Image: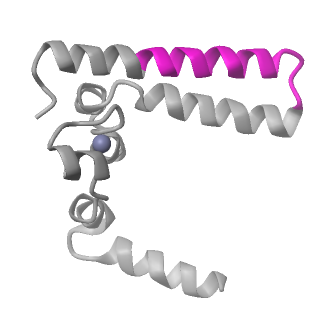
C-alpha cells in the first residue's frame, strides 16, 4: 500500500507541470455556488491553499484570509493531542472563535464589496 502511494505521488510530482498544476485543474466545485451562482463563506479556500503551496502568501490571503489561521489551528490541535498542553483546550476554542470571526467578517466584506459573483 505504501509503495502504491509512493508511486502515485512520484508520478504526480514528476509530471511535467507538477502536482500544483494538477491541483489547480482538479479543484472541487462548490455546490452552493453551483446552485445559486454566489460564493459561499468557504469559497476561495482551495485556491488559497494552492497559492500557499506555491509560496504566494499575499495571494493566498487575498483569496481566503482564514487559510493560515485554520492551518495554525490544525497544527496547534495536533500538538495539543500529542503533548496534552495545560491550557490547550481553551486555546483551541479561542482559535476556533478567531477563525470563525475571520470567515464571517470576510464574507460580510465580500457582500458589501459585491465580490460574491
Ligand atoms: Zn463555496
Total marks shown come to 0
Q: Is residue 71 above or below residue 27?
A: above
Position of residue 102 measured from the top left corner of the image (x, y, whole percent)? 42, 17
Q: Quarter of the image containing the C terminus? A: top left
The span picked out in magenta is 84-102
| Left or right: 81, with 8 as reference point | right
Position of residue 74 measured from the top left corner of the image (x, y, whole percent)? 62, 36
Residue at image position (29%, 33%) is 60
| Left or right: 61, with 7 as reference point | left
Tell me the chief SS of the magenta region.
Answer: helix
| Left or right: 62, with 88 as reference point | left
Which residue is nearer to you in this view: 108 or 50? Answer: 108
Residue at image position (45%, 29%) is 68
Residue at image position (30%, 61%) is 23
* Visual colour scheme: one colour
Does 108 lie within the magenta span?
no
Position of residue 116 measured from the top left corner of the image (x, y, whole percent)? 16, 30
Q: Is residue 56 above or below residue 30?
A: above
Which residue is nearer to you in this view: 95 or 9? Answer: 95
Q: Quadrant of residue 115?
A: top left
Which residue is nearer to you in this view: 3 or 115? Answer: 115
Quadrant field for ligand 1: top left
Which residue is nearer to you in this view: 98 or 107? Answer: 107
Does 99 lie within the magenta span?
yes
Q: Is residue 15 above or below residue 19?
A: below
Residue at image position (87%, 33%) is 83
Amino acid at each position: 500500500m505504501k509503495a502504491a502511494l509512493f508511486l502515485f505521488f512520484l508520478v504526480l510530482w514528476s509530471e511535467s507541470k507538477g502536482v500544483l498544476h494538477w491541483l489547480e485543474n482538479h479543484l472541487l466545485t462548490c455546490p452552493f455556488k453551483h446552485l445559486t451562482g454566489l460564493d459561499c463563506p468557504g469559497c476561495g479556500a482551495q485556491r488559497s491553499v494552492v497559492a500557499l503551496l506555491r509560496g504566494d502568501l499575499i495571494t493566498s490571503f487575498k483569496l481566503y484570509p482564514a487559510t493560515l489561521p485554520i492551518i495554525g489551528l490544525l497544527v496547534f490541535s495536533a500538538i495539543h493531542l500529542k503533548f496534552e498542553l495545560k491550557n490547550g483546550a481553551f486555546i483551541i476554542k479561542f482559535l476556533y472563535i478567531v477563525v470563525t470571526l475571520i470567515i464571517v467578517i470576510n464574507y460580510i466584506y465580500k457582500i458589501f464589496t459585491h465580490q460574491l459573483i
